[in-house]
Amino acid sequence: MPTINLLPWREAERKRRQRDFFIATGIAFVAGIAGVILTILVYNQRIDYQDQRNARLEAEIVDLERSISEIDGLERQKERLLARMEIIERLQGSRPEIVHLFDELSRQMPEGVYLTELTQEGPNVRLSGVAQSSTRVSALMRRIDSSEWLSDPSVVKVETTEFGPGRQARFIVTFKQVDMTNDDMEDAG
C-alpha cells in the first residue's frame, strides 16, 4: 500500500483557515467600525436636524412673545380708550344737569336771598350767601326740599350780623342734585 503524507496538506489547510479567519475577523472589525461611524453620523444628523427645529421653534416663540406683548399693549390701550369713552359719555349725559341746577336754583331762590358762592362735587352742592333774615334761609330750605331736582337740604351755618341799619344772615347750605337721567331711562324702558 502506498503511503500518502497528508501533513503538508493539513498544514496548508490550517494556514488557509487561519488566513480566512483573520480576513473574516478584519472584515468584521472594519464592518463594526463602519457601523459605529455610520450610527454616529446618523445620530449627529438627527441631532443637527432637531437643533434646527428647536432653533426655528425658539424663533417662533420669540415672535409669538412679541405678538403677545403687542396684544397686551393694545388691550391696555383699549381699556384706556374705553375708560375715556365712559367718562365722555358721563359728561355728555350730565351736561343738562348743570342747566337744570341753575334753572331750579333761580326758581327756588326766595326774595331777599343772594348767593355769594356755589360749589359742586358730584351730586353734592354747597351754597354760600347772604339773606335779609334767617327766615329767608328757612324758606330757601323748604323750597329746596320741595323741588324735584334738589334734595336733602341741610344748614351748615347761619350767622346773623349787623349790616348798616339792618341785620343780615350769612349762611352755608348743602343739598344734593337729583340724577333725573336714570329715572328718565327707567320710565322710558
Image: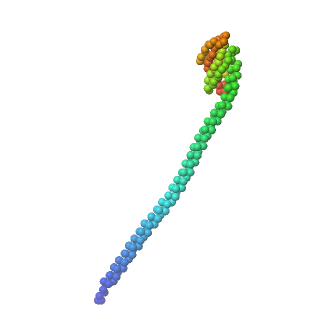
Residue 132 screen position, x and y as percent: 66, 13
- Residue at x 36%, y 79% (from the top left corner): 16
- Residue at x 52%, y 56% (from the top left corner): 55
- Residue at x 66%, y 33% (from the top left corner): 89
| Front-lying residue, 168 or 54 | 168
Name the quadrant containing residue 148: top right
Query: Quadrant of the image for the N terminus?
Result: bottom left
| Front-lying residue, 66 or 1 | 66
Does residue 26 appear to the left or right of 92 in the view shown? left
Residue ranking furthest to the front: 164
Query: Quadrant of the image for the C terminus?
Result: top right
Name the quadrant containing residue 99: top right
Q: Is residue 164 above or below residue 116?
A: above
Does residue 19 appear to the left or right of 91 in the view shown? left
Residue 24 screen position, x and y as percent: 39, 74
Residue ranking furthest to the top: 165
| Front-lying residue, 99 or 82 | 99
**Which color scheme did the rendering employ for the protein?**
rainbow
Q: Is residue 93 above or below residue 14?
A: above
Residue 121 screen position, x and y as percent: 61, 26
- Residue at x 67%, y 16% (from the top left corner): 113
Residue 33 screen position, x and y as percent: 42, 68
Residue 94: tell me if it is visible: yes
| Front-lying residue, 19 or 94 | 94
Name the quadrant containing residue 163: top right
